[in-house]
Image (tube, grey):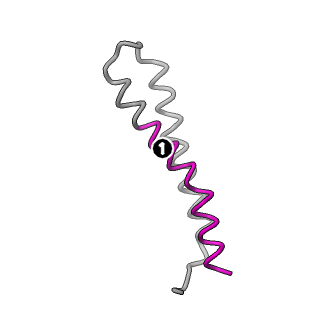
Amino acid sequence: MSETPRYEPELLHQLKNHLGVVVGFTELLLAEFPENDPRRADMLQIQAAATAAVELLPALSTHWRRDEG
């Protein structure tokens, strides 16, 4: 196994914060766009991708902890 850096928990925290900003701002924008605005589809894709990335973080954390042990 390769040497695993010890900063991953902080890295995960920072990544979660950045993704939270993306999710939050897309929610704000979606609230501002009318239902028939064609930009809503793009915003929904961005929001879905950011939400999916947030949902991957626990698995990534588990993977890093397993490699450290």
The relative height of residue 38 versus residue 25 in the rendered view (above or below) is: above
Q: Position of residue 56 (x, y in %)?
A: 55, 54
Circle 1: element type:
helix
Classify residue 48 as left or right of residue 56: left
Q: Position of residue 65 (x, y in %)?
A: 65, 72
Q: Quadrant of the C terminus?
A: bottom right
As shown in the figure, which amino acid type bears the numbered disc 1?
A: Ala
Q: Nearer the viewer, residue 47 or 24?
A: 47
Q: Quadrant of residue 5?
A: bottom right
Read off the magenta span. 46-69
Measuring 31% from the left and 20% from the top, which residue is drawn there? Answer: 38
Residue at the disc numbered 1: 50
Q: Is residue 62 magenta?
A: yes
Q: Position of residue 33 (x, y in %)?
A: 41, 17
Measuring 45% from the left and 18% from the top, which residue is drawn there? Answer: 32
Q: Is residue 66 magenta?
A: yes
Q: Quadrant of the N terminus?
A: bottom right
Count of marks, rendered view: 1
Measuring 41% from the left and 13% from the top, which residue is drawn there? Answer: 35
